[in-house]
Image: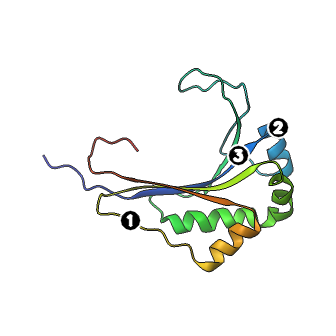
Amino acid sequence: MTSPPLTTREYAYFHVTGPGTHEEVTALLGLRPSEAWNVGDTNLRNGRMRSSMSWRMNSGLDDTSPLAEHIAALLHRLQPKASDLRQLWVEHDLILQCVGYFPPSGHGMHFDREQVRKAAQLGLALDLDFYYVDDHEHEI
């Protein structure tokens, strides 16, 4: 029996960390997070207490869509919130988190000038986590 071919998986999300609560971030932005927790909340995966506040918003796209489409979708949703994001970036980290799982032949990422300009205007840092998967047992 042959194994299925490895497929590229990539996604992006907007991530806020810093002081306060995730409810305060939700109220300021007027957007619902895809996932959020506060300091002291229990991490259901390991039973430990969370040491930081986290607010995440997914792009809304499937992980088989190209990373550039995830980024465009997030920037489109965040652009109308630019003034609210400026209030957040004073004390919070605002991150455009990009993740990719790729075959071992390699992969690169190109951000066009417009994406970089929009991310900078919104005060977003870029964090790129790329993994090269060469076996079929690796969990994504």
Question: What residue is shown at x 27% (from left), y 45% (from top)?
Answer: 136
**Residue closest to the eye, 29 or 62:** 29
Q: In the visual, does 108 lie left or right of 58?
A: left
SS label for mark 1: loop
Alpha carbon distance from label 3 to label 2: 15 Å
The answer to which of marks 3 and 1 sits earlier in the sequence is 3
Distance CA(mark 3)–CA(mark 1): 29 Å
**Residue identified by numbered label 1:** 107
Amino acid type for the residue under numbered disc 3: Pro
Asked whether the beta carbons under mark 3 and mark 1 sit within 8 Å of each other, the answer is no
**Element assignment for label 3:** loop
User: Is label 3 or label 1 in front?
Assistant: 1
Residue under the point 60% across and 22% down: 48
Residue 33: mark: 3
Callout 1 amino acid: His
How far apart are the two marked residues, 1 and 2, measured between alpha carbons?
37 Å
**Crowd band around label 1 with a 10 angstrom C-alpha radius: few (<14), some (14–19), many (20+):** few
Q: Are marks 3 and 2 in contact (CB under 8 Å)?
A: no
Classify mark 2: helix, strand or loop. Answer: loop
| Residue 62 visible | no
Q: In this view, does 100 lie to the left or right of 98?
A: left
Q: Where is residue 114 in the image (x, y as percent from the top left)?
A: 65, 78
Disc 3: CA contacts within 10 A as few (<14), some (14-19) or many (>=20) = some
Residue placed farthest to the left in the image? 1
Viewer-proximal residue among 111 and 45: 111
Residues under numbered marks 1 and 2 in contact, where contact means CB atoms less than 8 Å apart: no
The label nearer to you, 3 versus 2, is 2
**Residue visible at 47% across and 57% down?**
10
Check disc 2 and report the residue beneath it.
20
| Corner quadrant of residue 36 | top right
In the rendering, at what x and y percent does residue 81 appear? 81, 61
Residue drawn at the location 77% of the way across and 51% of the way down: 31
